[in-house]
Image: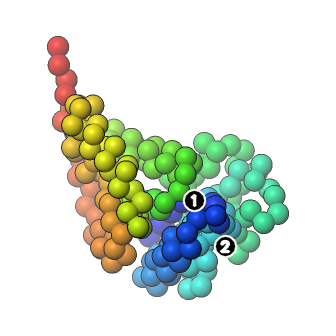
Amino acid sequence: MNICIYGSASNDIDRNYIERTEEFAKTLAKRGHSLVFGGGANGLMGAAARGFFSQNAKITGVVPKFFNVDGILFEDCNEMIRTDTMRQRKQIMDDMADAFITTPGGIGTYEEFFEIITLKQLGQSKKPLVLYNVNGYFEPLRAMLENCVKGGFMPQASIDLCFFSDNDEDIINYIENYVYVDTDISKLRKISN
């Protein structure tokens, strides 16, 4: 499978996030998976790339042309696809991916996650979506989503479209054994007169 991994491009984060992501990526590669990612050399993007690279797995980076700055891109990609815009970048990663794993990150990472979960909610994506919850990083996001459910802004079914876990083996089993359940949009929204 082509696994799209989203995540931080910052090296100013706790080393534990970097080490866990690199080890997890190695495990994914050992299981025969390949990487599709934003092409970055730093942070969790770089950690994922190094993990796959260490196992000689295929790595495809997708980057906008304006990221052509020394030290930003992972240079050992098997393929580097260059786009004109960030939107094109995300579309290509979405098209190439068989599954999505969101590792801890900032606003760009959240934006990528929310686009995919929105597509799943609308029945436009049939691919597994995971939040790699290292050190409980995504617990505030889970609480926010649960607050949306509590307030009636969305149903519980929307949260169930993604899988929260910090356990590498559980995530791999989820992805490899994923069965798409057709999304009935009418059940995801309370329609009232």
Quadrant of the snapshot with the C terminus? top left
Near-viewer residue (65 or 168): 168
Q: Is the Cβ of the residue at disc 1 closer than 8 Å to that at disc 2? A: no
Q: Is residue 116 left or right of residue 171?
A: right
What SS does tag 2 mark? loop
- Residue 3 is situated, as x and y percent measured from the top left of the image, at 47, 66
Q: Is residue 40 left or right of residue 137?
A: right
- Type of residue at label 1? Ser
Dividing the picture into quadrants, the one containing residue 167 is bottom left
- Residue 180 is situated, as x and y percent measured from the top left of the image, at 27, 56
Near-viewer residue (54 or 152): 152
The residue indicated by pointer 1 is: 8
Q: Is residue 109 above or below residue 53?
A: above
Instruction: Write the residue at 65% across / 66% down.
Output: 11
- Type of residue at label 2? Asn
Q: Is residue 69 above or below residue 32?
A: above
Q: Which mark is residue 78?
A: 2
Which mark is first along the chain, 2 or 1? 1
